[in-house]
Image (cartoon, rainbow, N blue to C red):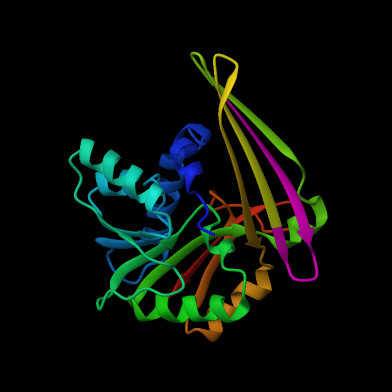
Amino acid sequence: MEVFKSYANYYDLLYEDKNYEEECDFIEDALKQYSGIKAGNILELGSGTGGHAIPLAKRKYEMTGIDASEGMLKKAREKAGKLGLNMNLQLCDIRNFEFGRSFDAVICMFAVFNYITQTSDIVKTLKNVKKHLKKGGLFIIDIWNGLAVMRILPSTRVKVIERGTTKIIRAVEPELDAVNHLCRNHYTMLVLEKDRVIEEIKETHVMRFLFPQEIKHYLEQSGFEVMKMCPFPRMDGLVNENIWNIAVISKG
């Protein structure tokens, strides 16, 4: 089942409080500090509605983005078009893509990498990223930290957004599968217009949380050098069982 299908219509509204500019600052800082080459073009895996790709394109990076949701890509293309930005956005599975060229950097943000649930697919994806990355280029991801997931534990969350006569109520009920390092997030979203339900959306997003030494092992086995792990989106601070979102910066 394609996730972010109907959900894509409301994605930007649900995450309007996310500080994409700050996260793009983090990406640029990583490129400046750790990349062995000057990054001019970037491939983003799971580019969604363009939350990172568009700010980076505005900062003069040549952006290529892939996503498995046509609905998300449609939104990104609309937003980029209104801003006059020329970005290459394609419908692809991040586990299996082919461009026939290499990039200065590859990024995979907002826990997109956690949607790869099988170990064999994780290794396959990393090897493909390595093939598409110029020597000395960076691969940057932010992921759910398994240490924190197991200590804090996922909990039910409800978010309510109101805009004029429209109200969106989104509930997420997590189902933890600790043995397999999985969390099945059951989303229910109600869209109301003048207190009348006009749409109900149900989706389940299965995510694989990753432990620091685990992702380090997969990266090194795929030919990467891990340069830094840190709380996301901060360069300072230590990764421990209290930090849910961590960044992993590796060099190809």
Dividing the picture into quadrants, the one containing residue 221 is bottom right
Magenta stretch encompasses residue 209: no
> Which residue does the image show at 25% across and 54% down from the upper left?
61
Q: Is residue 178 above or below residue 110?
A: below
Q: Position of residue 96 (x, y in %)?
A: 42, 75
Q: Position of residue 226 (x, y in %)?
A: 53, 73
Q: How many marks?
A: 0
88 displayed left or right of 123: left
Q: Nearer the viewer, residue 122 or 170?
A: 170
Q: Position of residue 165 (x, y in %)?
A: 51, 14
Q: Position of residue 133 (x, y in %)?
A: 34, 75
Q: Is residue 164 visible?
A: yes
Considering the image in quadrants, where does the C terminus appear? bottom left
Dividing the picture into quadrants, the one containing residue 32 is bottom left
Magenta stretch encompasses residue 170: yes
146 displayed left or right of 236: right
Q: Is residue 87 above or below residue 38?
A: above
Q: Is residue 241 visible?
A: no
Dividing the picture into quadrants, the one containing residue 149 is bottom right
Q: Is residue 74 above or below residue 1?
A: above
Considering the image in quadrants, where does the N terminus appear? bottom right
148 displayed left or right of 217: right
> Which residue does the image show at 80% across and 65% down from the upper left?
178
Magenta span main SS: strand
Which residue range is magenta in the image? 168-183
118 displayed left or right of 48: right
